[in-house]
Amino acid sequence: MREVQNQYKFTEGENHQFEIIGFTEIPETNDSFFILKNQFGGKHLLKSIHYAHYNYKVGDTINCRIDKINCSGKVFLEPENPFYKSGEIYDFDVIGYSTQINSIGETENTIIVKDLYGHENNCPLPDSISHEQIAGKIKCKVVRIKKGQLFLIHSSTESTKKLLQIGKKYTFTVHEIKDLDNIKFYILHDDYGNSYALKQDMYKHYNLCIGRQIECVVTKFGSDGQLKIEPKHPHYKIGKKYPFKFLRIDNDPDLLDKESKVIIVLDAYGIETKVSSYKPEIFDKPMPEYLNCLVEGVRKGKAILSIW
């Protein structure tokens, strides 16, 4: 995975300002959304329930991170938290203790903490720290904020465990195949003995096997405090164009554009893949047998494609 863009030239991880221009409720559901406008005039939806504690109102201008651009080119935003910042350490009130099975199948101790908005968050503890060592407050590092929720690690985690840098490439070794809740995962190790999980069915075409080494990029922190990785694609190189066999055009409606469409192609492994098209006129003429698509990134083993 790399810097994925869309028609507004937004790049994942960037910050931009957006104006809240409206609010809408979906009939017969409990869903409601803020309607945001970007600097190019494009509109985006922000689910209001996740940000009730941000006290937004129509007319506000807010700073948002481009959290994700999906394979259809849709942009997902994460507003800046009014108080907490990713990468910073804060004091939290301890309200309980628990255990969790993390994404690599390991049971770990966690502290349940309360943030200044009164929301509860889990913070996994390093093996070197027990519940008994925790007093009424604890220092935690905010490693990510998603849908208004804080993803935390203990402030000492980075001094007791070598953490790889997000956005950097490293070599990993397939250590084992593990069954977690009836789903098979590849468990990979880095050079420091840290473990990472990849869903086996998403990477069948990568021919991974125990003992094999593969280059991966570190993409983000998960909600359990574990780092996520994306292996280098075995066929496609990011930034290059390739011919893909055209299959069909599907409707891809959302609340802002009920007429939205997406192109479906077959990749080199016979996997159906969506293509983001930033030329609306492309849908007004017959499609060729093959489309020349730009590989903008890789996510969950699939190429992220676009046509400009």
Image (cartoon, rainbow, N blue to C red):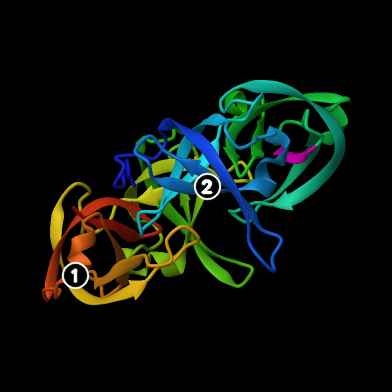
Instruction: Say which residue label 2 marks.
Output: 195
Residue depicted at 19% across the width and 70% down the height: 284
How far from the left and from the top, in percent, is residue 117?
78, 32
State whether residue 203 is above or below residue 116: below
Residue depicted at 66% across the width and 41% down the height: 51
Mark linked to residue 302? none
Q: Which residues are the magenta region?
A: 119-124
State whether residue 234 is above or below residue 158: below
User: Does residue 93 show up magenta in the picture?
Assistant: no
Q: Quadrant of residue 109?
A: top right
How far from the left and from the top, in percent, is residue 307?
20, 57
How far from the left and from the top, in percent, is residue 148?
64, 40
State whether residue 59 is above or below residue 284: above
In the picture, measured across the screen, residue 249 lies left or right of residue 202, that is: left
In the foreground, 114 or 111: 114
State whether residue 151 is above or below residue 213: above
Mark linked to residue 284? 1
Disc 1 is placed on an element classified as helix
User: Does residue 121 show up magenta in the picture?
Assistant: yes
